[in-house]
Amino acid sequence: MGQTAGMRIDLHTHSAVSDGTDAPAVLVEHAAEAGLDAIALTDHDTFDGVPEAQGAGARVGVVVLGGMEFSTRWDNHSVHLLAYGPRVDDPALSAELTRVREGRDGRVPAMIAKLADLGYPLTSDDVSAQAHGVSVGRPHLADAMVARGYVRDRDEAFARFLDDAGPAFVDRYATPLLEAVGLVKRAGGVAVVAHPWGRGARGVLGERVIVQLAEAGLDGLEVDHPDHDAAAREQLRGLAHRHGLLVTGGSDHHGTGKKHNPLGAGLTDPLVFEEILRRIAG
């Protein structure tokens, strides 16, 4: 084992640049306080927080791997793809991320209108006040509802109004999953499916789909995640090993935006982290 031996590594975190609640530097400081040696910053569809996070990491002694969580779709189902270390100036990847963010932003007025029809009026300024980066989404609508006193927290906003089956939901564009894997790989990155069996997705990403993704260049599966129980982790670990995929772990930390995802709630083996860094270095 190399220099990563004994490190505690969380490869799935979010800052206020997307839908977390902490600035990138504050997130890294909290990671140090939590006893983590390395994290990946994986904000939704953007790398904008990475420079600040890496600067903070250099100050407090936390390795920060630059990445993002790519909004994708498989068979009309939402799937998230963690992208580690791709070239942020890659033209094809940058253009696609712009398209994804425009789709995210474009549905906000329609969701505001639906909430108004339901008796919960918000303005675009209400939502903008909750968003601190380029990635605006449902969590910011939820935070605006909290600020107005309509709901107690994000969980209630999603459960009652904003989840995929909720009365205020509006669909948006997301990149086809196989295309997203290709974009990340061609940009020199490592592609890992986030929480593949979380949030009811077990029926979507079965073994035959995982085989297709592996053949298309997928690097790994995020197995050790708070959304996976012990049985799911064991089965996913076996599936990954059968098909030559890396097994990663991450907390999916969002600051106070999620209640059950503290930093370090999912960890990546140091040997796997070394392999990810090796693949990025080429």
Image: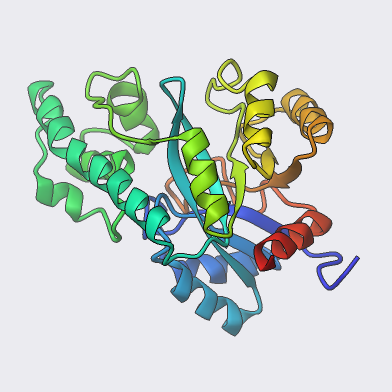
Name the residue rendered at 38%, 60% in the picture.
91
User: Does residue 146 appear in the picture of this structure?
Assistant: no
Question: From the viewer's perspective, is 66 left or right of 207?
Answer: left
Q: Nearer the viewer, residue 89 or 122?
A: 89
Q: Nearer the viewer, residue 227 or 211?
A: 211
Name the residue rendered at 30%, 20% in the picture.
166
Name the quadrant of the C terminus: bottom right
User: Does residue 235 appear in the picture of this structure?
Assistant: yes
Quadrant of residue 192 within the rendered picture: top right
Residue 189: x %, y % from top left = 58, 57
Name the residue rendered at 54%, 54% in the picture.
186
Vertical side of 185 occupied by 25: above or below: below
Vertical side of 251 occupied by 195: above or below: above
Residue 211: x %, y % from top left = 69, 27
Question: From the viewer's perspective, is 265 left or right of 92?
Answer: right
Residue 104: x %, y % from top left = 27, 41
Name the quadrant of the N terminus: bottom right
Q: Nearer the viewer, residue 265 or 99?
A: 99
Vertical side of 265 occupied by 78: above or below: above
Q: For the view shown, which residue lies furthest in the right direction?
A: 1
Q: For the view shown, which residue lies furthest in the bottom direction?
A: 59
For the image, the number of numbered tags is 0
Residue 71: x %, y % from top left = 42, 40
Quadrant of residue 237 within the rendered picture: top right
Vertical side of 22 occupied by 181: above or below: above
Name the residue rendered at 30%, 38% in the picture.
138
